[in-house]
Image: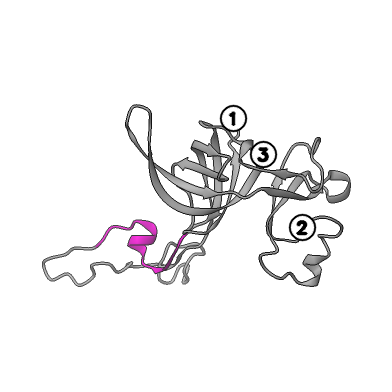
């Protein structure tokens, strides 16, 4: 993963291209991110940059407060981005939407919307049963295991269950507009999560 920014999903709207075409976009609000920690191989075993946002928004417990000694703002949300090198980065440095330009491709990571308890048709795209001729098993999952051998249900069998609320990454989403005046990114493509969900926007790796 490359360096990125933390933000909140605001919602959707549309903007118009110069040729008049309507472009649906997702608005992500990105306040300036503060570098709160630099991970190094000598000290931590890996290289990463830890960013924080929403300073002073909520009260932190003492273990969390201990990280923000000195002049670092006490950020209530912190996340790390794995990088190849931390050269040029300093504690307390701030990053904003100027990190991205219009037309850039980014990877967006967040927690997907929760769907509750879902059946196999919704969760795994199973086919439904017959609808006529007296059939009474329209949406049931059917058999899930054999009899004597193995005499149990295999681990990982696709069945009904909790759906959603998974960490999800959508790759190569296009930045339609990077608005530095309002600290907004307008993205064309899927963005995981509900409104106000925390998202991590990082530069897509070029293959």
Query: Gap between marks 2 and 1, in whole Å?
Result: 34 Å
Q: Quadrant of residue 189?
A: top left
Residue furthest front as drawn: 181
Q: Are marks 2 and 3 in contact (CB under 8 Å)?
A: no
Residue furthest right as drawn: 42
Q: Earlier in the sequence, mark 3 or mark 1?
A: 3
Q: Could you say which is closer to the camera, residue 143 or residue 48?
A: 48
Q: Are marks 3 and 1 in contact (CB under 8 Å)?
A: no
What numbered label is drawn on residue 2?
Answer: 3
Quadrant housing the C terminus: top right
Q: Could you say which is closer to the camera, residue 74 or residue 152?
A: 74
Residue labelled with disc 2: 73
Measured as percent of width and height from the top left, residue 204 is found at 58, 36
74 is within the stretch colored magenta = no
Query: Gap between marks 3 and 1, in whole Å?
Result: 11 Å
Residue furthest left as drawn: 133
Q: Are marks 2 and 1 in contact (CB under 8 Å)?
A: no
What span is in magenta? Answer: 113-128
Counting other residues with Cα less than 10 Å from the Cα at mark 2, is it few (<14), some (14-19), or many (20 or more)?
some
Q: Earlier in the sequence, mark 2 or mark 1?
A: 2
Q: Earlier in the sequence, mark 2 or mark 3?
A: 3
Query: Gap between marks 2 and 3, in whole Å?
Result: 24 Å
Q: What residue lies at 79% left-to-right and 46% top-to-bottom?
A: 46
122 is within the stretch colored magenta = yes
Find numbered disc 3 in the image and state the secondary structure of the residue it sits on. Answer: loop
Q: What residue lies at 88% left-to-right and 49% top-to-bottom?
A: 43
Measured as percent of width and height from the top left, residue 24 is found at 38, 42
Residue labelled with disc 1: 206
């Amino acid at each position: 993963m490359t360096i990125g920014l933390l933000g909140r999903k605001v919602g959707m709207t549309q903007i118009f291209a110069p040729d008049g075409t309507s472009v649906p976009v997702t608005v992500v609000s990105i306040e300036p991110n503060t570098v709160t920690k630099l991970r190094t191989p000598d000290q931590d075993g890996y290289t990463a940059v830890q960013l924080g946002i929403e300073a002073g928004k909520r009260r932190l417990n003492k273990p969390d407060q201990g990280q923000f000694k000195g002049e670092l703002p006490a950020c209530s949300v912190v996340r790390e981005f794995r990088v190849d090198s931390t050269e040029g980065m300093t504690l307390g440095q701030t990053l904003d939407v100027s990190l991205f330009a219009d037309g850039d491709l980014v990877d967006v990571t967040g927690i997907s919307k929760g769907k509750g308890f879902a059946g196999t048709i919704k969760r795994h795209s199973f086919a439904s049963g017959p609808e006529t001729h007296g059939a009474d098993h329209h949406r049931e999952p059917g058999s899930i295991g054999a009899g004597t051998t193995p005499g149990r249900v295999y681990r990982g069998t696709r069945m009904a269950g909790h759906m959603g609320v998974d960490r999800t990454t959508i790759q190569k989403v296009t930045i339609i507009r990077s608005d530095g005046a309002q600290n907004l990114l307008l993205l064309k493509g899927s963005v995981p999560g509900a409104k106000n969900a925390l998202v991590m926007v990082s530069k897509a790796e070029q293959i």
